[in-house]
Image (cartoon, rainbow, N blue to C red):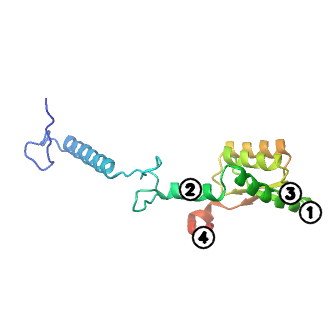
Amino acid sequence: MGVVYFKPEDRNFPFSDKPVIRTLCVRFIININYYTEYTVRRKTCTICVCDTTIPSIRFDKNGICNQYALHYKLDKRYPINNYGKKQFNKIRKRILKHAKKNKYGCIVRLSGGRDSTYTILVAKRLGFKPLALHFDNGWVSKTAIENIKKTVKKLNVDIRTILYPKCHFLRCPGRAVQ
């Protein structure tokens, strides 16, 4: 049994006498065509698994994506070997020296998610005396706020919260990042 394709304008198009069903069929065909066209045009990096489903992805002439290029650049600058450890220890010593003279050695942005929570935990364990900084734009979830409270209390770190009203973001979202 084969598949028969119809164009919506064909006289033999199924349900041509029923406008509602015909419209649904046309929409379905358009969606199938879009999906097929999209999957055909989707491009994947020649080195990693990143593809065009990532909105900001770009590819060079060799098909290597900008995500991998950034990873490669950072890996060369901060390798995970003895040289990388030496570089890290230099930075760590500078932060610890600063932390001895001041109340805080570094600022860590705390959103309540696992990445920022882990970052502030590592900063505390390394002796950096972190100050937690939280930006509240009015869309922060209750779970995130609870995570922030628990983290700050458990790690015994100070926190500063900067409040931005929702209306500020709704009126001019581009200005909020300036």
Q: From the viewer's perspective, is residue 114 above or below residue 173?
A: above
Q: Are marks 2 and 4 in contact (CB under 8 Å)?
A: no
Q: CA distance from mark 1 to mark 4?
A: 36 Å
- Look at label 4 and name its amino acid: Arg
User: Which residue does the numbered mark 2 point to in the structure image?
Assistant: 72
User: Which residue does the numbered mark 3 point to in the structure image?
Assistant: 96
Please tell me how crowded label 2 is: few (under 14), some (14-19), or many (20+) other residues with Cα within 10 Å.
few
- Foreground of the two, 27 or 71: 71
Instruction: Work out which residue is located at the far top of the displayed protein and give it.
Output: 1
Q: Quick one: label 2 or label 4, which is nearer the N terminus?
A: 2
Q: Secondary structure at mark 4?
A: helix
Q: From the viewer's perspective, is residue 24 above or below residue 176?
A: above
Q: CA distance from mark 2 to mark 4?
A: 33 Å
Q: Secondary structure at mark 1?
A: helix
Instruction: Give the number of callouts.
Output: 4
Q: Residue at x 40, y 59 (%)?
A: 62
Q: Is residue 142 visible?
A: no
Q: Secondary structure at mark 2?
A: helix
Q: Is residue 7 visible?
A: yes
Residue 175's tag is: 4
Q: Quick one: label 4 or label 3, which is nearer the N terminus?
A: 3
Q: Are marks 4 and 3 in contact (CB under 8 Å)?
A: no
Q: From the viewer's perspective, is residue 144 above or below residue 73?
A: above
Whole-percent x and y of residue 128? 83, 54
- Look at label 1 and name its amino acid: Lys
- Look at label 3 and name its amino acid: Leu
Instruction: Work out which residue is located at the far left of the displayed protein and give it.
Output: 11
Q: CA distance from mark 1 to mark 3?
A: 9 Å
Whole-percent x and y of residue 129? 85, 54
Residue 101's tag is: 1
